[in-house]
Image (tube, grey):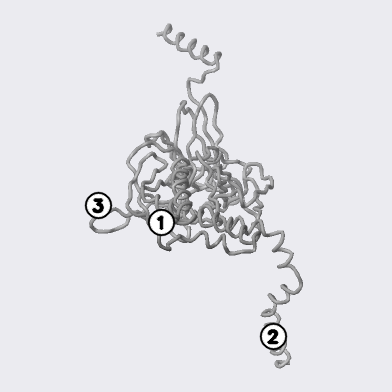
Amino acid sequence: MRQHRYIIVIALLFSILIGQNPIGFEVKGTAVYKSGTLLENAEVTLMDTTDKVIAQTKTSKKVLKRFGGGKFSFDGISKGSYKLNIKTGEDIDINHRFVVKNEKVDLGTLYPFKEFPIYQPSHYELDTPFKMRRISSVPDPADTINVKHVIVDLNGNANSVLVDSIVVDTVFYTDVKNLKPGTIFLDNIYFIYNDYGIFIHQSRSLKDRIGDLQKRDGYIIFHNGDTVAFDNIFFEPVLRNPEVATFHYSDSTGKAVYHSLFDIYKVRSGPSYVGQSVEKGFWTGIYIIGGVVSFQAISQQSIKPILQLLPDMSPPITGNFGTAVTIIPIITLGQITYDWIKDKRSNYFIPSNEHTPFPDNMFVFDLSEWIWKKSQPIVRPIMNSRPVKWWSQRKLRKVQKQAIKRKSASD
């Protein structure tokens, strides 16, 4: 027996000398409510990735009902990946994932926001989109910001911030990781939403993509790798905890199947998108021909360039069917080819994490928007001129005069 004891003691000393901890590592942290108040006497459950319970404890109580509290710790935890659940007694618990490597783990301050799930290919199940923080970020113990916003740019890069204000063409924010102020132009933003799943800003590109997808066929790719084909799709017009409805001809009841937008990575429209390409090609041809012919008519001071667009239908018909009849189909075919090569049918929505961009930029060109931006150096001085301001404020002056009359009558 003594020999066995000596062997065990020698093995323990040897493992300590080479830097390994045979007993395990300590895991600790602090739990708080959404308001930032320390969460005392709460049930804390440590599980592995298969939801098997490893250990349970409770957060510490406050001293004199005012000081401290909310702390918890586990000892002897082996290396591996773990899940943590803390009961808050509110509408959402604290859920957190972490990895134990070669040292003790300080989880810092944990808030009751659900972390972005680590997706594995499996059967897709609907879950509630309410109050879920869908983009994962590392909690900062010094972080005092409770309700955060996620800014996703057109390339799919995401950043957790606190949006201070949105002014004309710029977003002012505070970065939650280092609490430093920053700015970003609205032209570079795809959308902004907060912890509660409410979109506070939608770019014109996002709206255009949603508009192109409405009532089309195609399929959805979810973050967990599953796909769902649909014959019709509909997006909520107001993105507040948004859901996407899909319809399927195989379902004789005609009922919609609802999916959380935050679970959707990509929506790819089906063959019906060719109709969109034809429409864009047609109007592109109209704009190009209209611009060229208008320039010719102005330079020549004649309407002959416009008349040449019309087909020659006078007998005998010689085959001249007009420039428009020839050019517009060619441009339309070119638009179809371009959309196919650039894969314009693919639309990306929620990025998989903060630092994984989309394969393609989600910007959608709009001619009217481009013309409006280019005209601003001319339009703004006119809009800020005294005559225009005087005319635009005429209703306000009328209301002010009526208010003065009512005040004088009451006196």
The residue wearing badge 1 is 214
Q: What residue sits 57% from the left and 39% below the top?
A: 108
Which of these two is toward me, 10 or 278?
A: 278
- Along the horizontal axis of the image, is 259 left or right of 296? left
Name the kind of residue labelled 3 in the image.
Ser
Residue 94 seen in the current view: no
- With respect to residue 55, does 272 lie above or below? below
Q: Position of residue 377 (x, y in %)?
A: 72, 59
Task: Tell me if mark 2 has few (under 14), some (14-19) or many (20+) residues whose alpha carbon lies within 10 angstroms of its own.
Answer: few
Q: Nearer the viewer, mark 2 or mark 1?
A: 1
Q: What residue sits 51% from the left and 41% below the top?
A: 360
- With respect to residue 28, does 209 lie above or below? below
Q: Position of residue 325 (x, y in %)?
A: 45, 55
Which of these two is toward me, 337 or 357?
A: 337
- Along the horizontal axis of the image, is 96 left or right of 251? right
State the separation of the CA atoms marked 1 and 3. Answer: 19 Å
Q: Which tag, 2 or 3, sits closer to the chain's start?
A: 3
* Disc 1, SS: loop
State the separation of the CA atoms marked 2 and 1. Answer: 48 Å
Quarter occupied by the C terminus: bottom right
Label annotation for residue 123: none
The residue wearing badge 3 is 250
* Disc 2, SS: helix
The residue wearing badge 2 is 403
